[in-house]
Amino acid sequence: GNAFFDYQGQDNVFWDDQLSRLTKIGRLGDTIMFKDLPNNMRLAKVANRFNDKTSQGQSYVVVCGSRNEVANDPSLGDFGFEIIEHFQNVDINPAAHRESVFFMIALEARDQLRQLMAWQLSQLFAIVPLVLTGGWDHTENFLNYYDIFVRHGFGNFVNILREVTFNPLMAENLTFQDSKSGSYLFETTGSYTHADENYARELMQLFTIGVFLLNDDGTKMLNENGEPIPTFSNDEVMSFARVFTGFVQSQPRGNFEENDSSWNAIDELIVDPIYHDKFPKHDLTGGYIGDGYPLCVDLPSRTFLRKGATYRLLGDSPRPHAFIDEGTPMNDGPARVFELGENSRLREILCNSVNGSCQFQMTVTLDSNIECDTKECQVDEARVLKVHDVYYEYIRPPCVEQVFFNDSKKVTYKNSFRHSSCANPLLPHAAEACCTEGNGGTLTATRYTEYVFDHERVNFSAANVRCSRDGLSQCDFNFVQGDGVVGLHWTNSACQIAIKVNPEGKVAIVYEAMANIIHPNVHKDNMNYFKVYWNGDFPRNSLDENGGNSCGNGECSPLEDGGCFCYIEVDEEAVFSKMPRTDEVLSKLYIGA
């Protein structure tokens, strides 16, 4: 039949404008089965309100709230909550909601100095609502952004920068959301395009250091010619722009204000490693971003069992958040997962049993070193662990992988006709590939029969040991067959690291190996140049400029299209001959922690 609406107390034009926002479930007097309600209304509180019995025994999805979200107050009735001490109705116009909340807090909040600091900071880190998705009629995402400055009004400025950088509104406002690295675009399109520079420039120019160096009294520093000294150049803008690649929105979820299921402007952005630039990025002080962090090769063995190791709850899905691996295992049965043994101390900690039942926590950090148990003793690096029917993800501590290293080995996917690359044999970069002779002389390989989990990675030495236990050895295989075949696998083939040097002295990494296909990011034709700090002059092709040095007096080879090609060898030597002072250490030892 037909339905006729009579909007009491409101202009019908307003209701017509908002009609698309209403969920239509039936006519007055109709009987609606709970199971037939739209998804956004099939909620426990709806069932309880109307005393529905059919929903009993159904499963529900637990959705986390936003940071500092307040709980419902039953005394206010269904669907009610307080914004501050005294609940107030706000203007029914959606565009006025956030303004109403702001003025209520400005008038009634007891922490007026903090609120004043927050307002001042919000003027520095300004965003423009009209250029944002949902900028006109959304409230929660803007209040969530504003709360950054409320939280840190009396805190550390670096914490503000971090939260602003990972906020979806700022990322959309200054256009670095979904920015992709030049290396990714070169790999997928064959053309090189620089990363979006908008946020990198504004971060320095507007949010932090400004355009010119300043004296303590605020006047500009001048060079010997009496000219102001700039704080950064376009080289730094381009370097920092590569930092802000791969920033994408978190997966959509429930429990926040949104009518678009593909959009999440509340939760922090995540970094997609596929889109993120993987090459070195120089900073403003003559070093590189990452200086001062430990080198990955210096991390102790089995860091996942050491004090400070951190685990994040994944729930009933083994899908990790912190890393992405290629493909799924090539087997017909269930995937092999890293399930902790019953006598494992780590299992006991993650379970957090109370009265015989696990009380899983969202984040768990070890407060002391613990001993390994059975399978744990075989693993170089943990990833996802199973505890009963729940999964935790191990979060490896931040560390730096150097781009130049000696004795590199070729790694490739299960099929040697896929992309190959070079890897540091001291790091757990790939799985073992244990070889036998196949039909027709084709080298086939299999994984170690006792490998622990499908996406497990080990270093080159551990891969050799595993193969020997099966009576096999590593080789430069053509194909890896069997179960658990995902990601990269070690070969016993050497891999040579070289560089291309352009006329500006920037370098691009080139890998050379016995392979059908080298990964585009490190192929001889790649354009992924980055800045290095030369000790003296750099190799210059005489064709690029008059007075070139014949590519380092013949140490390197000239390239036909300009620049020089050089093979790399890493030399290490002691910096100090006696015990240094603290200031000497800090000024000279900035690689590693």
Image: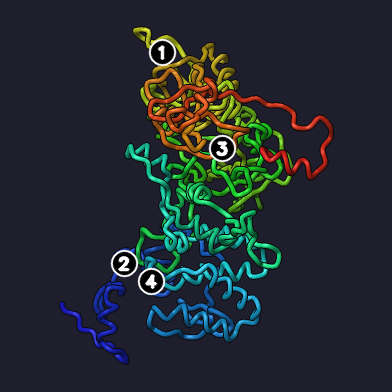
Q: Amino acid at mark 2?
A: Leu
What residue is pinned by disc 4? 130
Q: Are marks 1 and 3 in contact (CB under 8 Å)?
A: no
Residue type beneath disc 4: Leu
Mark toward the start of the polypeptide (2 vs 1):
2
Query: In the picture provided, is 114 more to the left or to the right than 33?
Result: right
- How many circles with numbers are drawn on the protein? 4
Alpha-carbon span between mark 3 and mark 2: 62 Å
Q: Using the numbered discs, state the Cα–Cα distance from disc 2 to disc 1 in whole angstroms.
A: 59 Å
Which quadrant: the C terminus? top right
Counting residues from the start of the chain, the first of labels 2 and 4 encountered is 2
Q: Which mark is residue 532?
A: 3
Give the residue pinned by disc 2.
37
Q: What's the mark number on residue 273?
A: none
Q: Which quadrant would residue 14 be assigned to in this image? A: bottom left
Q: Residue furthest bottom?
A: 9
Q: Identify residue for label 1.
A: 443
Mark in front: 2 vs 4: 4
The answer, for residue 57, to whether it is visible in the render is no
Q: CA distance from mark 1 to mark 4?
A: 61 Å
- Work out whether residue 75 or residue 520 is closer to the camera in this orientation and state it: 520
Please say if 222 is above or below 338.
Answer: below
Q: Residue furthest top?
A: 440
Label 2, label 4: how far apart the Cα atoms are: 34 Å
